[in-house]
Image: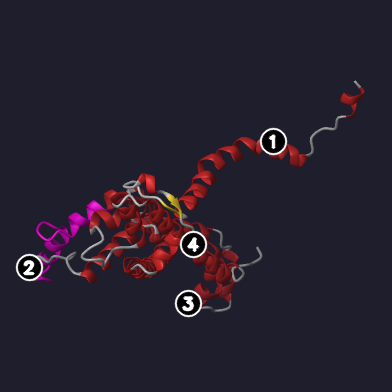
Amino acid sequence: MAALAERRPLGDNAKAWALNAPAIIVVTLLIAYPIAYSFWVSLQRHNLKRPRATKFVGLDNYGALLSDQAFLSALKVSALFVLLVLGLTVVLALILALVLNERFRGRGLLLSLALLPWAMPGVVNGLMWRTIFDAKTGALNGLLTQLGLIDGYQAWLTSGTGAFLFTALAQVWNTLPFAVIILLAGLSTIPAELYDAATVDRAGGLRRFVHVTLPWLLHPLLIVLILETMNAFRAFDTIYVLTGGGPGDATTTIALLDVQTVLTFTDFGLGSAYAWVITAITLLISVGYIGLLYRKGNFEV
């Protein structure tokens, strides 16, 4: 009885750990373990075509990537793809968010239409754009021909430059609504008093945007930059359905090469190394974004 009387109630920290223990266990089993296992596989020679030849090779898979011309080419394509997709997404999302932040008739309908591409799976998005760009029955050829802008139907996806640009356009169309939502939410938090004060100071539209709107959007822009960079680096389904990585290797990104390595060549060791390279690149870029924008976006309400 004396021992029971001396027992003290659990502290706040202990209660918090006890309440969160089930969630921590689930996260560990579903997320942490697969991540750790994939890194372990990347350190092995692990090919399903030779299951008995599996052995630990350390960083050899990563070293093989640096001397692989296919990897270096895919890295270059991925970098250009991310830059193009990210630039178009940020500019277009900012313009759309500024327009949708205004009050006008039909705003709700326009907002609903703007969100539709985000609800479309990547495979469906790729199929839709492949149909639009089709050389024989594509809607783009039909429209341009009817307007008299081209003399005959064009094979838009047969040239490397055309395939790359149209693939980036399809990716932007699919992911743009998410960026618009984030920026629109940021615009809704800007106090109207700041615009009133800028108007009293006779600040024009450009000065109001630079000195009032943009500083308040730095944190939402940070979120957009990080997530859209990750999405562009990991883009696979739209590219695979639309061009399959061709023509040649014009649209072969790291993510596409990773999937081909795992599913076509069944090389899980090298494929896991590809995945970790993608992770490392996106992590470094995200840290750079945070260093550039996070501190600059501090403000007081």
> Mark 1 and mark 2: span between their CA atoms?
70 Å
Which element type, helix, strand or loop, lies under badge 2?
loop
Q: How many marks?
A: 4
At 23% from the left and 52% from the top, the residue drawn is 127
Name the residue type under label 1.
Ala
Q: Answer above or below: position of 274 versus 51.
A: below
> Mark 3 and mark 4: span between their CA atoms?
38 Å
Residue 146 lies in the magenta-colored region: yes
Image marks 3 and 4: residues in contact by CB distance under 8 Å: no
Q: Nearer the viewer, mark 1 or mark 3?
A: 1
Residue under pointer 2: 152
Image marks 1 and 2: residues in contact by CB distance under 8 Å: no
Residue under pointer 4: 280
Q: Earlier in the sequence, mark 4 or mark 1?
A: 1
Residue under pointer 1: 18
Q: Nearer the viewer, residue 128 or 116?
A: 128
Q: Earlier in the sequence, mark 2 or mark 3?
A: 2
- Displayed quadrant of residue 166: bottom left
Q: Which residues are magenta?
A: 126-150
At 64% from the left and 37% from the top, the residue drawn is 21
At 52% from the left and 60% from the top, the residue drawn is 186
Q: Nearer the viewer, mark 2 or mark 4?
A: 4
Q: Picture coordinates of residue 100 (x, y %)?
A: 41, 59
Q: Is residue 293 visible?
A: yes
Dominant secondary-structure state across the stretch colored magenta:
helix
Residue under pointer 3: 206
Q: Nearer the viewer, residue 163 or 105?
A: 163
Which element type, helix, strand or loop, lies under badge 4?
helix
Name the residue type under label 4.
Ala
Q: Residue furthest front?
A: 53
